[in-house]
């Protein structure tokens, strides 16, 4: 009689990395605390306009994009654990400078420098761990493992991060500045859990055979973007996926409080609902994509659903007030549509598996193009606010983001045929050596079977 598989194996979670998932969650909670309170804090306490906050977060986002792009390649070269350590140090040191010097002196240039450069921190930590998952997870569970990564990632940024901010401000009665110190403590605890708890050996050493070829590894991601339009689609789709997350964090607080007359806490609760509902659907859509098609899942469950749900989230409060509905009723309906939007965001999970399938011999470089899209969203979302909010207002800005989702739907149709066994793509056959590596967690990743 065959003994049942351990629970983590059945769920598709690499057992050797379980403490990494826990530590990543706490790290991203700490990073996500500020997401929805930075704009009102800098506006009320330091005289920033909404557009200026958008510019600041755009600078931060550029750093995020650069770090996200290089995180995978650096993980190939140095090993994921070392890249994660670098990210943690960058985050903590620059956050201390931001809190102790830049904010206490209200020095705008120093705020831009310290906060902007801190953007290098979390992508190195988080996406270094994503590469670690790709190196350790079983090939048949790789998309599911990525889904669980986004459960941990999104549980913190911004789901529980927003909830911690809500509790800190409204229950414990801390101010904005004190709440930022709470975020620092959470990042420190999360980092400690990862570096003490994860003993898996594969992530402690380079993932490439010739780590001395630094320039070739780092430049491969750039070459993929230049020479293969499919990688450009991967980057663009991943950017569009998260653009509203970072744009809404900048302009929705003012939309809620100034345009609708609602409390800031209501927006924080909406954010928590969106991303709390999103969490279980990340591994679910990973499974659905593996079984029924990555591109098909992205088209319907990701792009189309996000476009429809975002429109409902934005326009429901306006329609409700126009009809004279009580604000609590209108807000409750908005929360329901926010939950649908959270489900749609998870529909993009198969994109990372598509990226790796396009260049399975160089998963780090392939993931660099994907990660660039993740980081670019942090810059593009606030940039859209800074540029278009003064021109077309919040309604026009929301319509632009809805249009971008439909553009990503079209792009997803250009990525069909990348999944082995679907749309005419041949199923790859594992070599004997790769079968051996699959049975030994400490061995090199099964690159021929990366899907």
Image (tube, grey):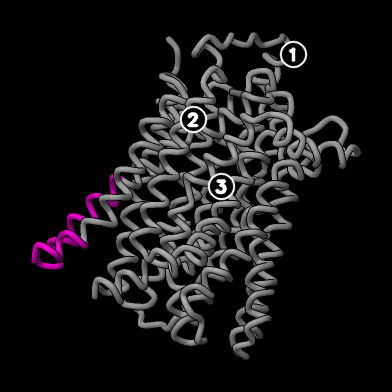
Give the residue at x 21% y 56%. 316
Q: Where is residue 280 in the image (x, y as percent from the top left)?
A: 37, 41
Q: Which of 425 and 429 is in front in this view?
A: 425
Circle 2 or circle 1, nearest the eye = 2
Q: Find the distance from the CA under tag 2 to the CA under tag 3.
A: 34 Å
Secondary structure beneath disc 3?
helix
Mark 1 crowdedness (10 Å alpha carbons): few <14, some 14-19, many ≥20: few
Q: Where is residue 65 in the image (x, y as percent from the top left)?
A: 64, 53
Tell me, yes or no, whether the highlighted magenta stretch contains residue 336: yes
Tag 2 residue: 412
Relative to 408, residue 120 above or below: below
Q: Find the distance from the CA under tag 3 to the CA under tag 1.
A: 29 Å
Q: Position of residue 384 (x, y in %)?
A: 50, 59
Q: What stretch is highlighted in magenta?
A: 318-340
Q: Position of residue 83 (x, y in %)?
A: 73, 50
Mark 2 crowdedness (10 Å alpha carbons): few <14, some 14-19, many ≥20: many
Tag 3 residue: 19
Name the N-terminal-most of marks 2 and 3: 3
Q: Nearer the viewer, residue 300 or 20?
A: 300
Secondary structure beneath disc 2?
helix
Circle 3 or circle 1, nearest the eye = 1
Q: The N terminus appears in which quarter of the rendering?
A: top left
Secondary structure beneath disc 1?
helix
Do the CB atoms of the residues marked 3 and 1 lie less than 8 Å apart?
no
Tag 1 residue: 433
Give the residue at x 60% y 52%. 375
Name the N-terminal-most of marks 2 and 1: 2
Majority secondary structure of the magenta segment? helix
Name the N-terminal-most of marks 3 and 1: 3
Relative to 120, residue 55 above or below: below
Q: Find the distance from the CA under tag 2 to the CA under tag 1.
A: 34 Å
């Amino acid at each position: 009689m065959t003994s049942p598989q351990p629970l983590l194996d059945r769920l598709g979670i690499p057992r050797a990395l379980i403490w990494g998932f826990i530590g990543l969650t706490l790290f991203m909670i700490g990073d996500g605390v500020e997401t929805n309170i930075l704009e009102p804090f800098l506006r009320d306490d330091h005289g920033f306009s909404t557009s200026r906050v958008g510019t600041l977060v755009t600078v931060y986002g550029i750093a995020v994009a650069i770090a996200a792009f290089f995180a995978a390649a650096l993980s190939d070269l140095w090993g994921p654990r070392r890249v994660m350590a670098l990210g943690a140090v960058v985050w903590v040191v620059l956050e201390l400078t931001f809190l102790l010097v830049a904010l206490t002196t209200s020095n705008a240039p120093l705020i831009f420098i310290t906060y902007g450069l801190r953007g290098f921190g979390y992508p190195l930590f988080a996406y270094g761990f994503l590469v670690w998952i790709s190196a350790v997870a079983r090939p048949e569970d790789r998309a599911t493992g990525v889904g669980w990564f986004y459960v941990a990632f999104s549980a913190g940024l911004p789901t529980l991060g927003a909830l911690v901010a809500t509790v800190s401000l409204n229950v414990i009665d801390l101010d904005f500045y004190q709440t930022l110190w709470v975020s620092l403590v959470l990042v420190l605890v999360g980092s400690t859990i990862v570096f003490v708890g994860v003993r898996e050996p594969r992530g402690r050493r380079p993932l490439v055979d010739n780590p001395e070829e630094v320039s070739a590894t780092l430049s491969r991601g750039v070459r993929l973007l230049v020479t293969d339009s499919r990688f450009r689609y991967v980057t663009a789709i991943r950017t569009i996926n998260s653009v509203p997350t970072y744009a809404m964090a900048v302009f929705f607080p003012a939309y809620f409080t100034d345009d609708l007359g609602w409390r800031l806490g209501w927006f924080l609760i909406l954010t928590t609902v969106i991303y709390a509902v999103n969490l279980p659907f990340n591994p679910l859509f990973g499974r659905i994509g593996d079984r029924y098609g990555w591109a098909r899942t992205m088209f319907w469950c990701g792009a189309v659903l996000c476009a429809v749900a975002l429109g409902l989230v934005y326009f429901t409060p306006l329609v409700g007030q126009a009809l004279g509905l009580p604000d609590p009723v209108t807000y409750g309906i908005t929360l329901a549509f926010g939950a649908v939007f959270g489900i749609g965001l998870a529909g993009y999970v198969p994109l990372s598996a598509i990226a790796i399938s396009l260049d399975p011999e160089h998963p780090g470089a392939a993931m660099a193009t994907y990660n660039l899209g993740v980081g670019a969203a942090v810059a593009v979302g606030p940039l859209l606010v800074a540029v278009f909010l003064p021109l077309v207002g919040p309604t026009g800005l929301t319509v632009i983001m809805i249009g971008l989702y439909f553009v990503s739907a079209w792009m997803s149709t250009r990525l069909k045929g990348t999944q082995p066994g679907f749309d005419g793509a041949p199923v790859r056959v594992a070599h004997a050596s790769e079968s051996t590596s699959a049975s030994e967690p400490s061995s090199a990743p099964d690159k021929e079977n990366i899907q």
